[in-house]
Image (cartoon, rainbow, N blue to C red):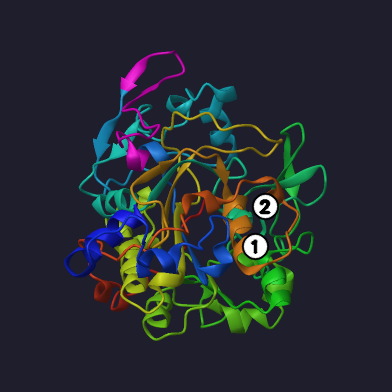
Amino acid sequence: MRKTIACITLALSTGCDSSVVAPDPVAAQYAERQAGEPSRYIKHIIIIVQENRSFENLFAGYPNADAPLYGYTHAGKQVALKPIALTNPADPSHGWKSAIADWDNGKMDGFDTQGRGSRLQPYSYVDRQSVKPYWTMAQSYVLADKMYPTEFGGSFTAHLELIAGTDQLSSTEAEAGNPSNTPWGCDAPPSTQTNVVNQQRQQRLGPFPCFTQFTTMADNLDAAGVSWKFYAPQTIGCTKDCNGGGLLWSAFDAISAVRYGQDWSRNIVNPETQILKDAANGNLASVSWVVPDWQNSDHGAAASDTGPSWVAAIVNTIGKSKYWNSTAIVALWDDWGGWYDDSPPPQLDYEGLAIRVPCIIISPYARAGTVSHTQYEFGSILKFAEQTFGLQSLNHTDARATSIGDAFNFKQTPLKFMTIKAKYPTKYFLGQKASLVPPDDE
Protein backbone atom coordinates (compact mmCIF):
# COMPACT_ATOMS: atom_id res chain seq x y z
CA MET A 1 0.00 0.00 0.00
CA ARG A 2 2.75 2.45 0.89
CA LYS A 3 4.57 1.63 -2.38
CA THR A 4 1.42 2.42 -4.35
CA ILE A 5 1.00 5.74 -2.56
CA ALA A 6 4.62 6.61 -3.16
CA CYS A 7 4.33 5.82 -6.86
CA ILE A 8 1.33 8.07 -7.23
CA THR A 9 3.10 10.81 -5.33
CA LEU A 10 6.24 10.67 -7.49
CA ALA A 11 4.68 9.85 -10.85
CA LEU A 12 4.89 13.33 -12.36
CA SER A 13 8.55 13.87 -11.56
CA THR A 14 10.32 10.51 -11.54
CA GLY A 15 8.11 7.83 -12.95
CA CYS A 16 7.57 4.72 -10.86
CA ASP A 17 10.42 2.31 -10.34
CA SER A 18 9.18 -0.71 -8.41
CA SER A 19 12.51 -0.96 -6.66
CA VAL A 20 12.23 2.49 -5.08
CA VAL A 21 9.77 3.39 -2.33
CA ALA A 22 9.56 7.03 -1.34
CA PRO A 23 9.00 7.77 2.36
CA ASP A 24 5.40 8.37 3.37
CA PRO A 25 5.50 10.90 6.25
CA VAL A 26 2.07 9.95 7.59
CA ALA A 27 2.82 6.24 7.54
CA ALA A 28 6.25 6.84 9.02
CA GLN A 29 4.79 8.88 11.86
CA TYR A 30 2.44 6.12 12.95
CA ALA A 31 4.29 2.98 11.83
CA GLU A 32 5.81 2.53 15.26
CA ARG A 33 2.46 2.64 17.02
CA GLN A 34 1.77 -0.59 18.85
CA ALA A 35 -1.64 -1.57 20.14
CA GLY A 36 -1.65 -2.03 23.89
CA GLU A 37 0.67 0.91 24.58
CA PRO A 38 -1.80 3.58 25.71
CA SER A 39 0.81 5.36 27.83
CA ARG A 40 2.52 6.65 24.69
CA TYR A 41 -0.60 8.35 23.33
CA ILE A 42 -3.15 8.84 26.11
CA LYS A 43 -2.32 11.48 28.71
CA HIS A 44 -5.83 12.19 29.96
CA ILE A 45 -8.76 9.93 30.87
CA ILE A 46 -12.22 11.32 31.61
CA ILE A 47 -14.88 9.07 33.14
CA ILE A 48 -18.37 10.55 32.73
CA VAL A 49 -20.87 8.85 35.03
CA GLN A 50 -24.54 9.24 34.10
CA GLU A 51 -27.54 7.71 35.83
CA ASN A 52 -29.88 4.77 35.66
CA ARG A 53 -30.18 3.49 32.11
CA SER A 54 -29.80 -0.04 30.79
CA PHE A 55 -28.12 -0.71 27.46
CA GLU A 56 -31.46 -1.64 25.91
CA ASN A 57 -33.10 1.51 27.24
CA LEU A 58 -30.74 3.79 25.29
CA PHE A 59 -29.60 1.60 22.40
CA ALA A 60 -32.43 -0.82 21.53
CA GLY A 61 -32.24 -1.54 17.82
CA TYR A 62 -28.63 -0.37 17.44
CA PRO A 63 -27.04 -2.09 14.41
CA ASN A 64 -24.63 -4.97 15.13
CA ALA A 65 -25.24 -4.71 18.89
CA ASP A 66 -27.01 -7.11 21.23
CA ALA A 67 -30.07 -4.86 21.36
CA PRO A 68 -33.40 -6.48 20.42
CA LEU A 69 -36.56 -4.42 20.41
CA TYR A 70 -38.46 -6.90 22.55
CA GLY A 71 -38.22 -8.56 25.94
CA TYR A 72 -39.85 -11.27 28.06
CA THR A 73 -42.04 -11.18 31.14
CA HIS A 74 -41.78 -13.63 34.02
CA ALA A 75 -44.63 -15.59 32.42
CA GLY A 76 -42.56 -16.09 29.26
CA LYS A 77 -44.58 -13.63 27.16
CA GLN A 78 -42.66 -11.69 24.53
CA VAL A 79 -43.44 -7.97 24.62
CA ALA A 80 -42.34 -5.19 22.30
CA LEU A 81 -40.29 -2.45 23.90
CA LYS A 82 -42.19 0.84 23.77
CA PRO A 83 -40.53 4.15 22.90
CA ILE A 84 -40.67 6.88 25.53
CA ALA A 85 -39.27 10.40 25.68
CA LEU A 86 -36.32 11.16 27.91
CA THR A 87 -38.64 13.60 29.70
CA ASN A 88 -40.91 10.73 30.76
CA PRO A 89 -40.81 10.72 34.60
CA ALA A 90 -40.98 6.92 34.92
CA ASP A 91 -38.56 5.59 37.53
CA PRO A 92 -38.61 1.79 37.85
CA SER A 93 -37.37 0.28 41.10
CA HIS A 94 -33.61 -0.21 41.01
CA GLY A 95 -32.31 -1.27 44.39
CA TRP A 96 -30.33 -4.45 45.13
CA LYS A 97 -33.37 -6.68 45.59
CA SER A 98 -34.95 -5.34 42.40
CA ALA A 99 -31.79 -6.14 40.47
CA ILE A 100 -31.84 -9.73 41.72
CA ALA A 101 -35.51 -10.04 40.78
CA ASP A 102 -35.04 -8.53 37.31
CA TRP A 103 -32.07 -10.82 36.65
CA ASP A 104 -34.03 -13.92 37.81
CA ASN A 105 -31.08 -16.31 37.74
CA GLY A 106 -30.08 -15.17 34.27
CA LYS A 107 -33.49 -15.48 32.65
CA MET A 108 -33.80 -11.66 32.45
CA ASP A 109 -37.56 -11.87 32.78
CA GLY A 110 -38.39 -10.42 36.18
CA PHE A 111 -38.75 -6.79 35.16
CA ASP A 112 -42.54 -6.91 35.19
CA THR A 113 -42.44 -7.92 38.86
CA GLN A 114 -40.61 -4.78 39.99
CA GLY A 115 -41.98 -1.83 38.02
CA ARG A 116 -43.52 1.16 39.75
CA GLY A 117 -46.86 1.88 38.14
CA SER A 118 -47.50 -0.30 35.10
CA ARG A 119 -45.86 -3.72 35.33
CA LEU A 120 -44.66 -3.27 31.76
CA GLN A 121 -43.15 0.15 32.45
CA PRO A 122 -39.56 -1.18 32.43
CA TYR A 123 -40.04 -2.58 28.92
CA SER A 124 -39.26 0.73 27.27
CA TYR A 125 -36.53 2.43 25.31
CA VAL A 126 -35.82 6.13 24.92
CA ASP A 127 -36.82 7.40 21.49
CA ARG A 128 -33.79 7.95 19.32
CA GLN A 129 -34.33 11.67 18.81
CA SER A 130 -34.09 12.22 22.57
CA VAL A 131 -30.70 10.50 22.73
CA LYS A 132 -29.37 11.44 19.30
CA PRO A 133 -26.05 12.78 20.70
CA TYR A 134 -25.38 9.38 22.30
CA TRP A 135 -26.05 7.57 19.03
CA THR A 136 -23.79 10.04 17.21
CA MET A 137 -20.97 9.36 19.68
CA ALA A 138 -21.51 5.61 19.41
CA GLN A 139 -21.49 5.71 15.61
CA SER A 140 -18.38 7.91 15.53
CA TYR A 141 -16.35 6.03 18.12
CA VAL A 142 -16.86 2.77 20.08
CA LEU A 143 -20.04 1.46 21.66
CA ALA A 144 -19.45 -1.33 24.18
CA ASP A 145 -22.43 -3.66 24.38
CA LYS A 146 -21.04 -5.88 27.17
CA MET A 147 -20.32 -3.43 29.99
CA TYR A 148 -21.57 -4.76 33.31
CA PRO A 149 -21.44 -3.05 36.71
CA THR A 150 -19.47 -5.00 39.27
CA GLU A 151 -22.39 -5.51 41.65
CA PHE A 152 -26.15 -5.80 41.57
CA GLY A 153 -27.82 -2.72 42.94
CA GLY A 154 -27.96 1.04 42.76
CA SER A 155 -25.77 4.09 42.63
CA PHE A 156 -23.86 4.07 45.92
CA THR A 157 -22.01 0.83 45.33
CA ALA A 158 -21.56 1.55 41.62
CA HIS A 159 -19.77 4.81 42.34
CA LEU A 160 -17.52 3.13 44.90
CA GLU A 161 -16.58 0.55 42.28
CA LEU A 162 -15.70 3.28 39.80
CA ILE A 163 -13.10 4.74 42.16
CA ALA A 164 -11.92 1.57 43.91
CA GLY A 165 -12.83 -1.46 41.84
CA THR A 166 -14.48 -2.86 44.96
CA ASP A 167 -16.81 -2.20 47.84
CA GLN A 168 -15.88 -5.30 49.82
CA LEU A 169 -15.58 -4.80 53.55
CA SER A 170 -14.01 -8.22 54.09
CA SER A 171 -13.41 -11.43 52.21
CA THR A 172 -17.00 -12.48 52.87
CA GLU A 173 -19.10 -9.29 52.82
CA ALA A 174 -19.59 -6.26 50.61
CA GLU A 175 -21.65 -3.10 50.56
CA ALA A 176 -24.96 -3.72 48.82
CA GLY A 177 -27.32 -0.80 49.33
CA ASN A 178 -27.49 2.89 49.95
CA PRO A 179 -26.83 4.41 53.37
CA SER A 180 -29.88 5.01 55.50
CA ASN A 181 -29.36 8.78 55.53
CA THR A 182 -27.97 11.43 53.25
CA PRO A 183 -25.38 12.57 52.60
CA TRP A 184 -23.81 9.26 51.56
CA GLY A 185 -20.44 9.28 53.25
CA CYS A 186 -18.38 10.49 56.17
CA ASP A 187 -20.63 13.55 56.46
CA ALA A 188 -23.73 11.46 57.15
CA PRO A 189 -25.49 11.67 60.53
CA PRO A 190 -23.80 9.43 63.14
CA SER A 191 -26.76 7.04 63.23
CA THR A 192 -26.38 6.21 59.52
CA GLN A 193 -26.01 2.58 58.52
CA THR A 194 -25.41 0.84 55.24
CA ASN A 195 -26.56 -2.50 53.85
CA VAL A 196 -24.17 -5.36 53.21
CA VAL A 197 -24.48 -8.69 51.45
CA ASN A 198 -22.66 -11.94 52.18
CA GLN A 199 -21.54 -14.81 49.98
CA GLN A 200 -24.98 -16.40 50.24
CA ARG A 201 -26.54 -13.16 48.98
CA GLN A 202 -28.14 -12.49 52.34
CA GLN A 203 -28.38 -8.88 53.47
CA ARG A 204 -27.93 -7.24 56.86
CA LEU A 205 -27.35 -3.74 58.21
CA GLY A 206 -23.77 -2.62 57.83
CA PRO A 207 -21.32 0.00 59.07
CA PHE A 208 -21.27 3.78 58.90
CA PRO A 209 -20.32 4.86 55.34
CA CYS A 210 -16.84 6.24 56.02
CA PHE A 211 -14.55 3.47 54.82
CA THR A 212 -10.97 2.50 55.57
CA GLN A 213 -11.33 -1.10 54.40
CA PHE A 214 -10.02 -0.73 50.84
CA THR A 215 -7.65 1.32 48.75
CA THR A 216 -8.87 3.51 45.88
CA MET A 217 -7.47 5.06 42.74
CA ALA A 218 -6.73 8.15 44.83
CA ASP A 219 -4.08 6.17 46.72
CA ASN A 220 -2.37 4.91 43.60
CA LEU A 221 -2.65 8.13 41.61
CA ASP A 222 -1.23 10.14 44.51
CA ALA A 223 1.58 7.64 45.02
CA ALA A 224 2.56 7.91 41.35
CA GLY A 225 2.27 11.70 41.25
CA VAL A 226 -0.51 11.54 38.67
CA SER A 227 -3.00 14.41 38.85
CA TRP A 228 -6.71 13.70 39.28
CA LYS A 229 -9.98 15.46 39.97
CA PHE A 230 -13.47 14.33 40.88
CA TYR A 231 -16.11 16.77 39.63
CA ALA A 232 -19.49 16.53 41.34
CA PRO A 233 -22.51 18.78 41.89
CA GLN A 234 -23.37 20.56 45.08
CA THR A 235 -26.29 19.31 47.12
CA ILE A 236 -27.93 20.56 50.29
CA GLY A 237 -27.43 19.06 53.74
CA CYS A 238 -23.86 19.93 54.70
CA THR A 239 -23.27 21.13 58.26
CA LYS A 240 -19.47 21.42 58.23
CA ASP A 241 -16.60 21.93 55.82
CA CYS A 242 -17.95 20.13 52.79
CA ASN A 243 -15.99 21.96 50.10
CA GLY A 244 -17.81 24.82 48.45
CA GLY A 245 -20.77 25.18 50.80
CA GLY A 246 -22.80 22.17 49.67
CA LEU A 247 -22.04 18.52 50.20
CA LEU A 248 -20.69 16.91 47.08
CA TRP A 249 -22.46 13.86 45.77
CA SER A 250 -19.10 12.17 45.53
CA ALA A 251 -18.05 8.60 46.18
CA PHE A 252 -14.88 9.96 47.76
CA ASP A 253 -16.95 11.43 50.60
CA ALA A 254 -17.24 7.81 51.77
CA ILE A 255 -13.46 7.31 51.76
CA SER A 256 -11.99 8.46 55.06
CA ALA A 257 -8.46 9.06 53.75
CA VAL A 258 -9.78 11.42 51.07
CA ARG A 259 -12.49 13.13 53.09
CA TYR A 260 -10.12 14.01 55.91
CA GLY A 261 -6.94 14.40 53.87
CA GLN A 262 -5.42 16.96 51.53
CA ASP A 263 -7.18 15.46 48.52
CA TRP A 264 -10.56 16.76 49.66
CA SER A 265 -9.73 20.41 49.08
CA ARG A 266 -7.24 19.78 46.29
CA ASN A 267 -8.95 17.26 44.03
CA ILE A 268 -12.68 17.22 44.84
CA VAL A 269 -14.21 19.94 42.67
CA ASN A 270 -17.59 21.61 42.48
CA PRO A 271 -19.59 22.62 40.65
CA GLU A 272 -19.23 19.83 38.12
CA THR A 273 -19.38 22.35 35.28
CA GLN A 274 -15.82 23.36 36.22
CA ILE A 275 -14.68 20.49 33.95
CA LEU A 276 -15.76 22.64 31.00
CA LYS A 277 -13.65 25.57 32.18
CA ASP A 278 -10.65 23.46 33.16
CA ALA A 279 -10.55 21.77 29.75
CA ALA A 280 -10.94 25.04 27.88
CA ASN A 281 -8.33 26.81 30.03
CA GLY A 282 -5.62 24.16 29.98
CA ASN A 283 -6.17 22.84 33.52
CA LEU A 284 -7.28 19.29 32.79
CA ALA A 285 -6.01 16.63 35.20
CA SER A 286 -4.64 13.31 34.02
CA VAL A 287 -7.67 11.41 35.38
CA SER A 288 -11.09 12.97 35.89
CA TRP A 289 -14.42 11.64 37.07
CA VAL A 290 -17.50 13.73 36.25
CA VAL A 291 -20.86 13.30 38.02
CA PRO A 292 -23.80 15.36 36.68
CA ASP A 293 -26.31 17.59 38.33
CA TRP A 294 -29.62 15.80 38.92
CA GLN A 295 -31.32 17.60 36.05
CA ASN A 296 -28.62 16.50 33.57
CA SER A 297 -28.20 12.96 34.87
CA ASP A 298 -30.61 10.98 32.61
CA HIS A 299 -32.36 9.73 35.77
CA GLY A 300 -35.97 8.98 34.87
CA ALA A 301 -37.43 10.86 37.82
CA ALA A 302 -35.64 14.04 36.72
CA ALA A 303 -37.92 14.12 33.64
CA SER A 304 -35.29 16.13 31.78
CA ASP A 305 -33.84 15.85 28.29
CA THR A 306 -30.59 17.72 28.97
CA GLY A 307 -28.37 14.71 29.80
CA PRO A 308 -27.23 13.90 26.25
CA SER A 309 -26.38 17.56 25.67
CA TRP A 310 -24.43 17.67 28.95
CA VAL A 311 -22.27 14.76 27.89
CA ALA A 312 -21.90 16.29 24.42
CA ALA A 313 -20.78 19.55 26.03
CA ILE A 314 -17.91 17.77 27.78
CA VAL A 315 -16.92 15.87 24.64
CA ASN A 316 -17.15 18.99 22.46
CA THR A 317 -15.09 21.03 24.90
CA ILE A 318 -12.35 18.40 24.89
CA GLY A 319 -12.63 17.97 21.13
CA LYS A 320 -12.07 21.67 20.50
CA SER A 321 -9.23 21.96 23.01
CA LYS A 322 -5.53 21.14 22.92
CA TYR A 323 -6.35 17.91 24.77
CA TRP A 324 -8.20 16.07 22.00
CA ASN A 325 -5.22 14.17 20.59
CA SER A 326 -4.19 12.86 24.01
CA THR A 327 -7.53 12.03 25.64
CA ALA A 328 -9.78 9.03 26.17
CA ILE A 329 -13.33 9.71 27.33
CA VAL A 330 -15.51 6.96 28.77
CA ALA A 331 -19.20 7.77 29.13
CA LEU A 332 -21.24 5.20 31.03
CA TRP A 333 -24.27 4.85 33.28
CA ASP A 334 -23.86 3.77 36.90
CA ASP A 335 -26.70 1.23 36.97
CA TRP A 336 -29.54 -0.08 34.84
CA GLY A 337 -32.21 2.03 36.55
CA GLY A 338 -34.76 -0.80 36.56
CA TRP A 339 -35.12 -0.74 32.76
CA TYR A 340 -35.31 -3.95 30.75
CA ASP A 341 -32.14 -5.50 29.39
CA ASP A 342 -31.78 -8.84 27.63
CA SER A 343 -28.13 -9.67 28.30
CA PRO A 344 -27.58 -12.12 31.22
CA PRO A 345 -24.63 -10.78 33.24
CA PRO A 346 -21.92 -13.39 33.89
CA GLN A 347 -21.79 -14.27 37.57
CA LEU A 348 -18.19 -13.92 38.73
CA ASP A 349 -18.90 -13.88 42.47
CA TYR A 350 -21.68 -13.22 44.97
CA GLU A 351 -21.79 -9.52 44.06
CA GLY A 352 -22.35 -9.88 40.33
CA LEU A 353 -21.69 -8.97 37.57
CA ALA A 354 -24.82 -6.85 37.39
CA ILE A 355 -27.32 -5.79 34.75
CA ARG A 356 -25.74 -4.30 31.64
CA VAL A 357 -25.33 -0.55 31.11
CA PRO A 358 -24.32 1.52 28.07
CA CYS A 359 -20.70 2.53 27.58
CA ILE A 360 -19.29 4.80 24.87
CA ILE A 361 -15.51 5.09 24.42
CA ILE A 362 -14.46 8.32 22.70
CA SER A 363 -10.93 9.13 21.53
CA PRO A 364 -8.97 10.01 18.41
CA TYR A 365 -7.57 6.48 18.75
CA ALA A 366 -10.94 4.74 19.17
CA ARG A 367 -11.82 2.08 16.60
CA ALA A 368 -14.28 4.31 14.82
CA GLY A 369 -17.77 2.98 14.23
CA THR A 370 -17.15 -0.22 16.16
CA VAL A 371 -19.42 -2.15 18.50
CA SER A 372 -17.17 -3.86 21.03
CA HIS A 373 -18.50 -7.20 22.25
CA THR A 374 -15.70 -7.64 24.78
CA GLN A 375 -16.92 -8.41 28.30
CA TYR A 376 -16.11 -5.36 30.42
CA GLU A 377 -16.89 -4.37 34.00
CA PHE A 378 -16.18 -1.16 35.89
CA GLY A 379 -12.74 -2.48 36.81
CA SER A 380 -11.95 -2.53 33.08
CA ILE A 381 -11.82 1.27 33.09
CA LEU A 382 -9.56 1.35 36.14
CA LYS A 383 -7.24 -1.24 34.58
CA PHE A 384 -6.91 0.94 31.47
CA ALA A 385 -5.99 3.91 33.69
CA GLU A 386 -3.40 1.74 35.45
CA GLN A 387 -1.91 0.67 32.12
CA THR A 388 -1.88 4.22 30.83
CA PHE A 389 -0.17 5.81 33.81
CA GLY A 390 1.94 2.90 35.00
CA LEU A 391 0.04 2.51 38.26
CA GLN A 392 0.10 -0.38 40.67
CA SER A 393 -2.98 -2.57 40.51
CA LEU A 394 -5.56 -2.08 43.22
CA ASN A 395 -5.79 -5.88 43.25
CA HIS A 396 -9.54 -5.68 43.28
CA THR A 397 -11.77 -6.30 40.26
CA ASP A 398 -9.31 -4.35 38.13
CA ALA A 399 -6.98 -7.35 38.38
CA ARG A 400 -9.50 -9.78 36.83
CA ALA A 401 -11.17 -7.39 34.39
CA THR A 402 -10.36 -7.07 30.71
CA SER A 403 -9.04 -3.59 30.00
CA ILE A 404 -10.98 -1.35 27.63
CA GLY A 405 -7.65 -1.00 25.79
CA ASP A 406 -8.88 -3.20 22.94
CA ALA A 407 -11.32 -0.42 21.97
CA PHE A 408 -8.33 1.62 20.73
CA ASN A 409 -6.06 1.41 17.71
CA PHE A 410 -2.85 3.28 18.40
CA LYS A 411 -1.55 2.54 14.92
CA GLN A 412 -4.19 4.67 13.25
CA THR A 413 -3.91 8.32 12.33
CA PRO A 414 -5.77 10.18 15.10
CA LEU A 415 -9.39 10.84 14.20
CA LYS A 416 -10.24 14.44 13.46
CA PHE A 417 -12.78 15.73 15.93
CA MET A 418 -16.25 16.45 14.61
CA THR A 419 -18.61 18.45 16.82
CA ILE A 420 -21.41 16.43 18.41
CA LYS A 421 -24.66 18.20 17.60
CA ALA A 422 -26.89 18.63 20.64
CA LYS A 423 -30.10 20.40 21.61
CA TYR A 424 -28.50 22.44 24.41
CA PRO A 425 -25.17 24.23 23.79
CA THR A 426 -22.23 24.23 26.19
CA LYS A 427 -23.03 27.76 27.38
CA TYR A 428 -26.41 26.50 28.60
CA PHE A 429 -24.70 24.41 31.29
CA LEU A 430 -22.27 27.14 32.27
CA GLY A 431 -25.25 29.36 33.03
CA GLN A 432 -27.53 26.68 34.48
CA LYS A 433 -28.68 27.06 38.09
CA ALA A 434 -27.74 24.08 40.27
CA SER A 435 -30.67 21.92 41.30
CA LEU A 436 -29.04 21.05 44.69
CA VAL A 437 -30.67 17.61 44.34
CA PRO A 438 -28.47 14.49 44.53
CA PRO A 439 -28.28 12.71 41.15
CA ASP A 440 -29.91 9.62 42.70
CA ASP A 441 -31.34 8.42 46.00
CA GLU A 442 -31.60 4.68 45.28
Left or right relative to 90: residue 128: left
Q: Quadrant of residue 362?
A: bottom left
Badge number at residue 386: 1
Judging depth in this view, the residue of 298 and 182 nearest the camera is: 298
Provide the residue span drawn in magenta.
57-79
Say which residue appears at 59% left-offset and 23% top-offset.
Answer: 105
Q: Which residue is mark 2?
A: 398
> What residue is at 63 percent from the left and 76 percent from the top?
226
Q: Decide: is 262 above or below 421.
A: below
Residue 8, percent across and down? Answer: 22, 60
Dot 2 crowding, Cα within 10 Å, few <14, some 14–19, many 20+: many
Q: CA distance from mark 2 to mark 1?
A: 9 Å
Marks 2 and 1: which is nearer the front? 1
How far across and down, in percent of the image, does residue 108 sit? 49, 25
Amino acid bearing label 1: Glu
Residue 409 position in % (x across, y down):
46, 55
In this rendered view, identify the residue nearer to me: 104 or 228: 228
Q: Considering only vertical position in the picture, is 345 above or below 289?
A: above
Is 191 part of what is drawn in magenta? no
Q: Are marks 2 and 1 in contact (CB under 8 Å)?
A: yes
